[in-house]
Image (cartoon, rainbow, N blue to C red):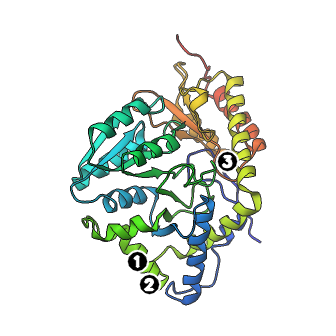
Protein backbone atom coordinates (compact mmCIF):
# COMPACT_ATOMS: atom_id res chain seq x y z
CA UNK A 1 0.00 0.00 0.00
CA UNK A 2 1.09 3.57 -0.69
CA UNK A 3 0.76 6.41 1.79
CA UNK A 4 -0.92 9.05 -0.39
CA UNK A 5 -1.48 12.51 1.09
CA UNK A 6 -5.15 13.39 0.92
CA UNK A 7 -6.06 16.89 -0.26
CA UNK A 8 -9.65 18.12 -0.14
CA UNK A 9 -10.41 19.89 -3.41
CA UNK A 10 -13.22 22.43 -3.14
CA UNK A 11 -12.61 23.61 -6.72
CA UNK A 12 -15.05 22.59 -9.51
CA UNK A 13 -12.82 19.76 -10.77
CA UNK A 14 -10.62 17.82 -10.91
CA UNK A 15 -12.24 16.37 -7.82
CA UNK A 16 -10.89 14.62 -4.75
CA UNK A 17 -10.41 10.94 -5.62
CA UNK A 18 -10.28 7.75 -3.59
CA UNK A 19 -6.96 5.96 -3.21
CA UNK A 20 -8.43 2.97 -5.04
CA UNK A 21 -9.10 5.16 -8.10
CA UNK A 22 -5.56 6.56 -7.94
CA UNK A 23 -4.01 3.12 -7.61
CA UNK A 24 -6.12 1.70 -10.47
CA UNK A 25 -3.67 3.46 -12.78
CA UNK A 26 -0.78 1.29 -11.56
CA UNK A 27 -1.12 -1.60 -13.99
CA UNK A 28 1.17 -3.58 -16.30
CA UNK A 29 2.02 -1.67 -19.47
CA UNK A 30 -0.30 -2.52 -22.34
CA UNK A 31 -0.57 -1.48 -25.96
CA UNK A 32 -4.00 0.14 -26.34
CA UNK A 33 -4.50 -1.71 -29.64
CA UNK A 34 -4.77 -5.05 -27.84
CA UNK A 35 -8.16 -6.79 -27.93
CA UNK A 36 -8.16 -6.91 -24.12
CA UNK A 37 -8.04 -3.13 -23.93
CA UNK A 38 -10.68 -2.70 -26.64
CA UNK A 39 -12.98 -4.92 -24.58
CA UNK A 40 -12.46 -2.69 -21.55
CA UNK A 41 -13.39 0.40 -23.56
CA UNK A 42 -16.50 -1.32 -24.90
CA UNK A 43 -17.71 -2.06 -21.36
CA UNK A 44 -16.86 1.47 -20.27
CA UNK A 45 -18.86 2.96 -23.15
CA UNK A 46 -21.87 0.81 -22.25
CA UNK A 47 -21.65 1.79 -18.57
CA UNK A 48 -21.57 5.51 -19.41
CA UNK A 49 -24.89 5.16 -21.24
CA UNK A 50 -26.32 3.44 -18.16
CA UNK A 51 -25.28 6.36 -15.95
CA UNK A 52 -27.70 8.62 -17.86
CA UNK A 53 -30.41 5.93 -18.21
CA UNK A 54 -30.11 5.84 -22.00
CA UNK A 55 -31.56 3.06 -24.13
CA UNK A 56 -28.43 1.30 -25.52
CA UNK A 57 -30.23 0.67 -28.80
CA UNK A 58 -30.73 4.40 -29.25
CA UNK A 59 -27.83 6.00 -27.35
CA UNK A 60 -24.10 5.35 -27.39
CA UNK A 61 -21.03 6.94 -25.88
CA UNK A 62 -17.91 8.04 -27.71
CA UNK A 63 -14.60 8.51 -25.90
CA UNK A 64 -12.04 11.23 -26.59
CA UNK A 65 -8.69 12.24 -25.16
CA UNK A 66 -8.91 15.73 -23.72
CA UNK A 67 -10.53 18.01 -21.16
CA UNK A 68 -14.22 18.81 -21.03
CA UNK A 69 -13.97 21.64 -23.56
CA UNK A 70 -13.09 19.16 -26.31
CA UNK A 71 -16.66 17.82 -26.03
CA UNK A 72 -18.18 21.24 -26.65
CA UNK A 73 -15.95 21.66 -29.70
CA UNK A 74 -16.81 18.20 -31.06
CA UNK A 75 -20.57 18.46 -30.64
CA UNK A 76 -20.87 21.92 -32.13
CA UNK A 77 -18.60 21.41 -35.13
CA UNK A 78 -19.84 17.88 -35.88
CA UNK A 79 -23.62 18.19 -35.49
CA UNK A 80 -24.45 21.30 -37.52
CA UNK A 81 -25.85 20.56 -40.99
CA UNK A 82 -25.05 22.77 -43.96
CA UNK A 83 -27.10 25.97 -44.06
CA UNK A 84 -28.36 25.69 -40.48
CA UNK A 85 -27.77 27.60 -37.23
CA UNK A 86 -26.90 26.89 -33.62
CA UNK A 87 -28.88 28.57 -30.83
CA UNK A 88 -26.73 28.94 -27.71
CA UNK A 89 -28.82 29.58 -24.59
CA UNK A 90 -26.13 31.50 -22.75
CA UNK A 91 -26.22 32.49 -19.09
CA UNK A 92 -22.65 31.87 -18.02
CA UNK A 93 -18.98 31.34 -18.75
CA UNK A 94 -19.29 27.83 -20.18
CA UNK A 95 -22.10 28.62 -22.60
CA UNK A 96 -20.06 31.67 -23.57
CA UNK A 97 -17.26 29.24 -24.41
CA UNK A 98 -19.66 27.50 -26.81
CA UNK A 99 -20.28 30.87 -28.49
CA UNK A 100 -16.52 31.36 -28.88
CA UNK A 101 -16.22 27.94 -30.54
CA UNK A 102 -18.96 28.88 -33.00
CA UNK A 103 -17.08 32.09 -33.75
CA UNK A 104 -13.76 30.30 -34.29
CA UNK A 105 -15.30 27.87 -36.77
CA UNK A 106 -17.35 30.60 -38.43
CA UNK A 107 -20.55 28.63 -37.82
CA UNK A 108 -23.87 30.50 -38.01
CA UNK A 109 -25.18 30.93 -34.49
CA UNK A 110 -27.39 32.98 -32.19
CA UNK A 111 -25.99 34.03 -28.84
CA UNK A 112 -29.12 34.21 -26.68
CA UNK A 113 -27.38 35.89 -23.78
CA UNK A 114 -28.98 36.51 -20.41
CA UNK A 115 -27.95 37.27 -16.82
CA UNK A 116 -25.35 34.99 -15.23
CA UNK A 117 -27.24 35.42 -11.96
CA UNK A 118 -30.44 33.72 -13.16
CA UNK A 119 -31.84 30.88 -15.25
CA UNK A 120 -32.63 31.56 -18.92
CA UNK A 121 -35.98 33.07 -19.86
CA UNK A 122 -37.87 30.21 -21.52
CA UNK A 123 -40.13 32.68 -23.33
CA UNK A 124 -37.05 34.22 -24.95
CA UNK A 125 -35.88 30.75 -26.02
CA UNK A 126 -39.28 30.01 -27.54
CA UNK A 127 -39.28 33.34 -29.38
CA UNK A 128 -35.77 32.79 -30.75
CA UNK A 129 -36.78 29.39 -32.11
CA UNK A 130 -39.96 30.77 -33.63
CA UNK A 131 -38.05 33.60 -35.30
CA UNK A 132 -35.29 31.32 -36.63
CA UNK A 133 -36.73 28.17 -38.23
CA UNK A 134 -33.25 27.33 -39.55
CA UNK A 135 -31.94 26.52 -36.06
CA UNK A 136 -30.87 22.85 -36.11
CA UNK A 137 -28.98 22.67 -32.80
CA UNK A 138 -29.98 24.12 -29.44
CA UNK A 139 -27.14 24.18 -26.94
CA UNK A 140 -26.89 25.07 -23.26
CA UNK A 141 -25.09 24.15 -20.06
CA UNK A 142 -26.89 22.07 -17.44
CA UNK A 143 -24.91 23.34 -14.48
CA UNK A 144 -23.09 26.63 -15.01
CA UNK A 145 -20.01 25.89 -12.91
CA UNK A 146 -18.93 29.52 -12.89
CA UNK A 147 -21.91 30.46 -10.72
CA UNK A 148 -23.66 27.29 -9.52
CA UNK A 149 -26.88 28.01 -11.46
CA UNK A 150 -28.81 24.91 -12.53
CA UNK A 151 -30.58 25.42 -15.85
CA UNK A 152 -34.03 24.01 -16.80
CA UNK A 153 -32.76 21.59 -19.43
CA UNK A 154 -35.87 19.42 -19.65
CA UNK A 155 -37.94 22.44 -20.70
CA UNK A 156 -35.30 23.76 -23.12
CA UNK A 157 -34.94 20.30 -24.68
CA UNK A 158 -38.70 20.09 -25.18
CA UNK A 159 -38.69 23.50 -26.88
CA UNK A 160 -35.88 22.41 -29.21
CA UNK A 161 -37.75 19.26 -30.21
CA UNK A 162 -41.02 21.12 -30.85
CA UNK A 163 -39.14 23.24 -33.37
CA UNK A 164 -37.38 20.32 -35.06
CA UNK A 165 -33.94 20.95 -33.54
CA UNK A 166 -31.68 18.62 -31.59
CA UNK A 167 -30.72 19.46 -28.01
CA UNK A 168 -27.07 19.34 -26.92
CA UNK A 169 -26.40 19.82 -23.22
CA UNK A 170 -23.07 20.36 -21.49
CA UNK A 171 -23.30 18.16 -18.39
CA UNK A 172 -19.58 18.28 -17.60
CA UNK A 173 -20.06 19.35 -13.99
CA UNK A 174 -23.35 17.58 -13.27
CA UNK A 175 -23.17 14.11 -14.86
CA UNK A 176 -22.65 11.48 -12.18
CA UNK A 177 -23.80 13.83 -9.43
CA UNK A 178 -27.22 15.23 -10.35
CA UNK A 179 -29.43 12.38 -11.62
CA UNK A 180 -29.99 12.66 -15.38
CA UNK A 181 -32.34 10.67 -17.59
CA UNK A 182 -31.55 11.62 -21.18
CA UNK A 183 -34.91 10.47 -22.51
CA UNK A 184 -37.10 12.07 -19.84
CA UNK A 185 -34.93 15.21 -19.89
CA UNK A 186 -35.17 15.55 -23.70
CA UNK A 187 -31.39 15.39 -24.13
CA UNK A 188 -30.05 14.20 -27.49
CA UNK A 189 -26.38 14.70 -26.54
CA UNK A 190 -24.67 15.22 -23.20
CA UNK A 191 -21.03 15.19 -22.21
CA UNK A 192 -18.54 15.06 -19.36
CA UNK A 193 -14.93 14.38 -18.46
CA UNK A 194 -13.75 11.67 -16.11
CA UNK A 195 -12.29 13.92 -13.42
CA UNK A 196 -15.57 15.62 -12.49
CA UNK A 197 -18.68 13.78 -11.30
CA UNK A 198 -17.23 10.30 -11.81
CA UNK A 199 -14.29 11.22 -9.55
CA UNK A 200 -11.63 9.66 -11.78
CA UNK A 201 -8.51 11.23 -13.28
CA UNK A 202 -7.97 13.86 -15.97
CA UNK A 203 -7.46 13.12 -19.66
CA UNK A 204 -10.62 11.27 -20.71
CA UNK A 205 -13.77 12.95 -22.00
CA UNK A 206 -16.89 11.42 -23.48
CA UNK A 207 -20.04 12.31 -25.38
CA UNK A 208 -23.27 10.36 -24.92
CA UNK A 209 -25.79 10.75 -27.73
CA UNK A 210 -28.16 9.30 -30.25
CA UNK A 211 -26.66 6.87 -32.73
CA UNK A 212 -28.99 7.87 -35.54
CA UNK A 213 -27.98 11.53 -35.34
CA UNK A 214 -24.27 10.65 -35.19
CA UNK A 215 -24.65 8.47 -38.27
CA UNK A 216 -26.55 11.19 -40.12
CA UNK A 217 -23.75 13.65 -39.31
CA UNK A 218 -21.32 11.81 -41.60
CA UNK A 219 -22.81 13.90 -44.42
CA UNK A 220 -22.46 17.22 -42.58
CA UNK A 221 -19.60 19.67 -43.30
CA UNK A 222 -16.25 18.44 -41.96
CA UNK A 223 -14.86 21.22 -39.76
CA UNK A 224 -12.25 19.23 -37.83
CA UNK A 225 -10.30 16.01 -38.26
CA UNK A 226 -9.30 15.11 -34.70
CA UNK A 227 -12.51 16.52 -33.22
CA UNK A 228 -15.11 14.84 -35.44
CA UNK A 229 -17.82 12.85 -33.69
CA UNK A 230 -18.75 10.54 -36.55
CA UNK A 231 -15.13 9.70 -37.36
CA UNK A 232 -14.43 8.61 -33.78
CA UNK A 233 -17.76 6.78 -33.44
CA UNK A 234 -17.27 4.94 -36.73
CA UNK A 235 -13.77 3.86 -35.76
CA UNK A 236 -15.06 2.49 -32.46
CA UNK A 237 -17.84 0.61 -34.22
CA UNK A 238 -15.47 -0.94 -36.77
CA UNK A 239 -12.43 -1.66 -34.59
CA UNK A 240 -13.42 -1.25 -30.93
CA UNK A 241 -10.65 1.29 -30.57
CA UNK A 242 -10.10 5.04 -30.48
CA UNK A 243 -8.95 6.50 -33.78
CA UNK A 244 -5.95 7.99 -31.98
CA UNK A 245 -4.05 7.02 -28.83
CA UNK A 246 -6.31 6.81 -25.77
CA UNK A 247 -5.34 7.93 -22.24
CA UNK A 248 -4.69 4.37 -21.07
CA UNK A 249 -4.16 4.92 -17.33
CA UNK A 250 -7.10 7.31 -17.10
CA UNK A 251 -9.36 4.68 -18.62
CA UNK A 252 -8.28 2.20 -15.94
CA UNK A 253 -9.04 4.77 -13.24
CA UNK A 254 -12.43 5.58 -14.79
CA UNK A 255 -13.43 1.92 -14.83
CA UNK A 256 -12.62 1.75 -11.12
CA UNK A 257 -14.47 5.01 -10.47
CA UNK A 258 -17.57 3.60 -12.16
CA UNK A 259 -17.41 0.49 -9.96
CA UNK A 260 -17.43 2.81 -6.97
CA UNK A 261 -20.25 4.87 -8.52
CA UNK A 262 -22.46 1.79 -8.82
CA UNK A 263 -21.52 0.67 -5.30
CA UNK A 264 -22.50 4.02 -3.79
CA UNK A 265 -25.65 4.38 -5.91
CA UNK A 266 -27.00 7.32 -7.91
CA UNK A 267 -29.44 8.52 -5.23
CA UNK A 268 -27.02 8.06 -2.37
CA UNK A 269 -24.21 9.84 -4.23
CA UNK A 270 -26.36 12.89 -4.98
CA UNK A 271 -27.51 12.92 -1.35
CA UNK A 272 -23.88 12.99 -0.21
CA UNK A 273 -23.00 15.86 -2.55
CA UNK A 274 -26.07 17.73 -1.34
CA UNK A 275 -25.27 17.36 2.35
CA UNK A 276 -21.76 18.62 1.62
CA UNK A 277 -23.35 21.58 -0.18
CA UNK A 278 -25.57 22.28 2.83
CA UNK A 279 -22.54 22.07 5.13
CA UNK A 280 -20.78 24.65 2.95
CA UNK A 281 -23.74 27.02 3.29
CA UNK A 282 -23.86 26.45 7.05
CA UNK A 283 -20.18 27.25 7.46
CA UNK A 284 -20.39 30.35 5.30
CA UNK A 285 -23.41 31.64 7.20
CA UNK A 286 -21.67 31.15 10.54
CA UNK A 287 -18.74 33.28 9.34
CA UNK A 288 -21.03 35.91 7.78
CA UNK A 289 -20.24 35.32 4.10
CA UNK A 290 -22.82 36.05 1.40
CA UNK A 291 -23.39 34.06 -1.79
CA UNK A 292 -24.45 35.73 -5.01
CA UNK A 293 -26.93 33.21 -6.47
CA UNK A 294 -30.34 32.74 -4.89
CA UNK A 295 -30.76 29.33 -3.31
CA UNK A 296 -33.75 28.11 -5.35
CA UNK A 297 -31.72 28.00 -8.59
CA UNK A 298 -28.47 26.66 -7.14
CA UNK A 299 -27.34 23.26 -8.34
CA UNK A 300 -26.32 21.83 -4.98
CA UNK A 301 -22.74 21.53 -6.25
CA UNK A 302 -21.19 25.03 -6.36
CA UNK A 303 -21.51 28.03 -4.06
CA UNK A 304 -20.35 31.40 -5.42
CA UNK A 305 -19.22 33.48 -2.45
CA UNK A 306 -19.02 37.28 -2.50
CA UNK A 307 -15.70 38.78 -1.46
CA UNK A 308 -16.07 40.65 1.84
CA UNK A 309 -15.53 44.41 1.73
CA UNK A 310 -12.85 44.43 4.41
CA UNK A 311 -9.65 46.13 3.25
CA UNK A 312 -7.55 43.22 4.50
CA UNK A 313 -9.29 40.67 2.29
CA UNK A 314 -6.80 39.00 -0.06
CA UNK A 315 -8.04 35.91 -1.87
CA UNK A 316 -4.55 34.72 -2.79
CA UNK A 317 -3.37 34.82 0.82
CA UNK A 318 -6.47 32.97 2.03
CA UNK A 319 -6.13 30.43 -0.79
CA UNK A 320 -2.47 29.79 0.00
CA UNK A 321 -3.14 29.35 3.72
CA UNK A 322 -5.93 26.86 3.03
CA UNK A 323 -3.79 25.06 0.44
CA UNK A 324 -0.93 24.66 2.90
CA UNK A 325 -3.40 22.98 5.25
CA UNK A 326 -4.79 20.55 2.66
CA UNK A 327 -7.79 22.44 1.25
CA UNK A 328 -8.15 24.02 -2.20
CA UNK A 329 -10.55 26.90 -2.86
CA UNK A 330 -11.11 28.43 -6.27
CA UNK A 331 -11.57 31.88 -7.83
CA UNK A 332 -14.95 32.95 -9.15
CA UNK A 333 -15.86 33.23 -12.81
CA UNK A 334 -18.22 36.20 -12.88
CA UNK A 335 -16.60 39.08 -14.75
CA UNK A 336 -18.67 41.79 -13.04
CA UNK A 337 -18.46 40.55 -9.44
CA UNK A 338 -15.58 39.49 -7.18
CA UNK A 339 -16.31 35.97 -5.94
CA UNK A 340 -14.69 32.71 -5.00
CA UNK A 341 -16.19 29.24 -5.26
CA UNK A 342 -16.62 26.33 -2.86
CA UNK A 343 -17.77 23.08 -4.46
CA UNK A 344 -19.21 19.80 -3.21
CA UNK A 345 -17.73 17.58 -5.93
CA UNK A 346 -15.50 14.62 -5.27
CA UNK A 347 -14.98 11.96 -2.63
CA UNK A 348 -15.65 14.23 0.34
CA UNK A 349 -18.27 14.43 3.10
CA UNK A 350 -19.52 16.78 5.82
CA UNK A 351 -16.55 16.18 8.17
CA UNK A 352 -14.20 17.49 5.46
CA UNK A 353 -16.23 20.70 5.26
CA UNK A 354 -16.28 21.14 9.02
CA UNK A 355 -12.49 20.74 9.07
CA UNK A 356 -12.17 23.22 6.20
CA UNK A 357 -14.06 25.95 8.01
CA UNK A 358 -11.75 25.61 11.01
CA UNK A 359 -8.86 26.30 8.63
CA UNK A 360 -10.69 29.13 6.83
CA UNK A 361 -11.46 30.84 10.16
CA UNK A 362 -7.80 30.53 11.13
CA UNK A 363 -6.84 32.18 7.82
CA UNK A 364 -9.24 35.06 8.43
CA UNK A 365 -7.81 35.55 11.93
CA UNK A 366 -4.21 35.34 10.72
CA UNK A 367 -4.73 38.12 8.17
CA UNK A 368 -7.09 40.19 10.39
CA UNK A 369 -9.95 39.86 7.89
CA UNK A 370 -13.45 40.75 8.99
CA UNK A 371 -16.35 39.36 6.97
CA UNK A 372 -18.27 42.58 6.46
CA UNK A 373 -20.31 43.97 3.59
CA UNK A 374 -20.97 47.62 2.93
CA UNK A 375 -24.61 47.95 1.95
Q: Position of residue 291 (x, y in %)?
A: 58, 26
The answer for how far apart the CA atoms under marks 3 and 1 are is: 44 Å
Q: Are marks 2 and 3 in contact (CB under 8 Å)?
A: no
Q: Residue at x 60, y 29 (%)?
A: 296
Q: Is residue 258 left or right of residue 268?
A: left
Q: Position of residue 337 (x, y in %)?
A: 44, 27
Tell me the SS state at disc 1: helix
Q: Are marks 3 and 1 in contact (CB under 8 Å)?
A: no
- Depth check, mark 2 against mark 3: the one in front is 2
Rendered image: mark on residue 234: 1
Q: Nearer the viewer, residue 127 or 139?
A: 127
Q: Is residue 55 left or right of residue 213?
A: right
The answer for how far apart the CA atoms under marks 2 and 1 are is: 6 Å
Q: Residue furthest top?
A: 375
Q: Residue at x 40, y 73 (%)?
A: 232
Mark 2 closeness class: few <14, some 14–19, many ≥20 residues within 10 Å: few
Up-down relation of residue 125 to residue 73 (above or below): above
Rendered image: mark on residue 326: 3
Tell me the SS state at disc 2: helix
Q: Position of residue 102 (x, y in %)?
A: 28, 51
Determine the image quadrant of residue 320.
top right
Residue at image mark 2: 238
Q: In the rendered image, which quarter contains the N terminus?
A: bottom right
Residue 188 seen by the camera: yes
The answer for how far apart the CA atoms under marks 2 and 3 are is: 46 Å
For marks 3 and 1, the one nearer the N-term is 1
Q: Position of residue 360 (x, y in %)?
A: 67, 33
For marks 2 and 3, the one nearer the N-term is 2
- Depth check, mark 3 against mark 1: the one in front is 1
Determine the image quadrant of residue 282.
top right
Amino acid sequence: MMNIKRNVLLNPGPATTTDSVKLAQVVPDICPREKEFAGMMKSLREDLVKVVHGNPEEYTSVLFTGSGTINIDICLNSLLPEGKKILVVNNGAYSSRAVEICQYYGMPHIDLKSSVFDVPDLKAVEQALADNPDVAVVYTTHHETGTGVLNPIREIGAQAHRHGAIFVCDTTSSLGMIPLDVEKDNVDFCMASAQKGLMAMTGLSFIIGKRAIIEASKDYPKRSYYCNLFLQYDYFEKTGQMHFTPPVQTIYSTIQALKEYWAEGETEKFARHHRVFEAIHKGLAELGFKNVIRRDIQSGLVVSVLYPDDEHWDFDKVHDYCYEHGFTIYPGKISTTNTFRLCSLGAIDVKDIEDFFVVLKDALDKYHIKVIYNE
